[in-house]
Image (cartoon, helix red, strand yellow):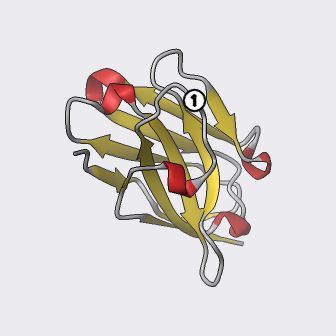
Amino acid sequence: QVQLVESGGGLVQAGDSLRLSCAASGRTFSSYTMGWFRQAPGKEREFVACITRSVSITYYADFVKGRFTISRDNAKNTVYLQMNSLKPEDTAVYYCAGDGDGGSVSSTPSRYDYWGQGNQVTVSS
């Protein structure tokens, strides 16, 4: 069992930066692919980025390439999402998630076994 707790969200202005953190409990964190998803009001949950367990292959949604960076610190059981050049359309609840198939990237929510509670990010224009 893995529990995920996100932090670092908040209200910022367009062009600002935020770093989200997701702290995981359990000794198996390093074996998971970790992902970030987001959900805006009235919209479906969408993939943002993920990072595999060991060689840390990363994969991003097109709309965040060049602006967001996902990273992980297995010693701290934590995955991060550095978000730069934020836009109002980035406003959403951001979720981190863990996929037990840690060797591959995945943008499909159903592939992920564990989810955090979500963290609100609001970007004002």
Give the quarter of the figure containing the N terminus.
top left
* Residue displayed at 72% across by 68% down: 89
Residue 52 point in image, percent of width and height: 52, 28
Q: Secondary structure at mark 1?
A: loop
**Quadrant of residue 51 in the image?**
top right
Left or right of 32? Residue 109 is: right
Residue drawn 60% across the image and 81% down it:
41
**Amino acid of disc 1:** Ser
Q: Of 52 and 11, which appears nearest the observer?
A: 52
Identify the image quadrant of residue 74: top left
Residue 122 visible within the image: no
Q: Quadrant of residue 70?
A: top right
Task: Judge the density around disc 1: few (<14), some (14-19), many (≥20) Cα neighbours within 10 Å.
Answer: some
- The residue positioned 39% from the left and 50% from the top of the image is 113
Image: 53 above or below 78 = above
Q: Is residue 15 left or right of residue 45?
A: right
Q: Quadrant of the image for the C terminus?
A: bottom right
Residue 48, position as x, y percentages in the image: 63, 50
| Image: 122 above or below 37 | below
Q: Is residue 98 visible?
A: yes
Residue at horizontal 25 percent and vertical 50 percent from the top: 3
Extreme top residue here? 55
Task: Count the marks.
Answer: 1
Residue 43, percent across and down? 65, 77
Residue beneath label 1, please?
104
